[in-house]
Amino acid sequence: MQTRTLPDLGQFTEQARAWLAGMAPPRTAAAWGEGSDSVAVFENWTAEQERAHTDEIRAYEQAKFDAGWGALDWPADYGGRGLPMSYVLAFRRVEEEFAVPRRTEMFSVTQQLVAPTVAQWGTETQRERWVRAMLRTDLIACQLFSETEAGSDLAAVRTRAVRTEDGGWRLDGHKVWTSGARVADLGVAVCRTDPAAPKHAGLTVFLVPMDTPGVTVRPIRQMTGGSSFNEVYLDDVRLPDEYRLGPVGKGWPVALTVLAAERLDGAHLGLANADRAVALAGHLGRALTDLERDRVADLVTRSYVQRVAAMRVAAAVVAGKDPGPEASIGKLLATDTMARTSEVVRLLLGRDLGADSGRWGHFAWTEHVLGAPGYRIAGGTDEIQHNIVAERVLGLPKEPRL
């Protein structure tokens, strides 16, 4: 048996730094009051702006992939290098040192959620067709999961997929809260194929080309003023059977594969804005009250707790273990950090939060305050995360399920 010798991690890091130096300038901490003061939780881009940003990020991701830095822990068959997760984390730390394009949610959805799911559940033809293309971001994917009648209860989806005479499928239904639908090439749709079966057993997953006739994307106007999310209508959408992902009626475990990866991806959510709120406290031009100091210190402490939880998840992944419920704890910590960041900002700014005084880093916080509550729903509601922790960590009785 031949033992593979891994590259020296120090040399690997220096090689990564040298490549990144040729791609982007070093990232420098901007002085307070310089540059953008945006702390938006959900970007308020127009369709044209979203496309432009997506194209910019895609170009960087493709260059990274082609240079051998993009799919480090994937097998060579998919363009990877088959390295342990520790090398992926090492590259990400170095990458943070450079002003490379910041990935939007669609790229983590594509590369870290959907590509692994296709690799696990897809046929050989599907894996050859889609996995490498997703890792390189030649194709961008979105999730067609949530429905107005099926929020946290994904198994209650009503979108129907019916067999057609030619062996294909006809999809009809309505999906909601879909990020990136305007720029996505494929949508991962959970559909009901057997209405008579128990709700978890009658589901099937499909990969829907977003330019298929019958697919209509409509932006949803948020209270922040932007449209980060969309509703997607599927009206008489015809697909060949080759777009079915996984066995008929086995869509629930396929969907769980996507959801498990989604919860791993939110470990650092909200920390950048928490750090910005702490910086705001030091640039008010006045002394803080005792209450303000207490709240800022509490936010600092809780953000460190979230970072430690993220490190535990990363350590489990590096060790080749399933992080399990720690991922749900991380998601809960993240949404709590975002909520407490809002509380601190409201306390520090008072009326300046609601009226644009023209001061840098003040009125911009309205975007965070209005957007942060959305993450109590996005990526698995807080209530669902609490159930996971209660049942799998504390061993409490399971919630009754119909």
Image (cartoon, rainbow, N blue to C red):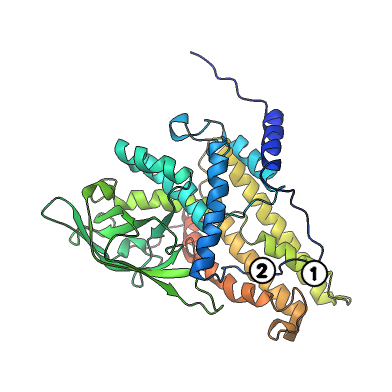
Q: Which residue is mark 2?
A: 39
- Could you tell me which quadrant the C terminus lies in? bottom left
Does residue 141 appear to the left or right of 12 in the view shown?
Answer: left
Of callouts 2 and 1, the N-terminal one = 1
- Residue 33's label in the rendered image is 1
- Label 1 neighbour load within 10 Å: few <14, some 14-19, many 20+: few
- Residue shown at 59%/46% (left/top)? 313
- Quote the CA–CA distance across marks 2 and 1: 13 Å
Report which quarter residue 283 is drawn in.
bottom right
- Label 2 neighbour load within 10 Å: few <14, some 14-19, many 20+: many
Q: Height in image: 168 above or below 120?
A: below
Q: Amino acid at mark 1?
A: Gly
Q: Height in image: 40 above or below 29?
A: below
- Residue shown at 43%/31% (left/top)? 77
Residue found at the very far top of the displayed protein: 1
Residue 366 at least partly seen: yes
- Residue shown at 46%/51% (left/top)? 110
Question: Quick one: SS at disc 2?
Answer: loop
Q: Amino acid at mark 2?
A: Val
Rendering coords of residue 81 (x, y %) = 53, 31
Rendering coords of residue 314 (x, y %) = 60, 43
Does residue 339 appear to the left or right of 61 in the view shown?
Answer: right
Question: Quick one: SS at disc 1?
Answer: loop
- Residue shown at 78%/57% (left/top)? 29
Residue 394 at least partly seen: no
**Nearer-the-camera pick, 66 or 81:** 66
Rendering coords of residue 231 (x, y %) = 39, 70
Rendering coords of residue 199 (x, y %) = 26, 60
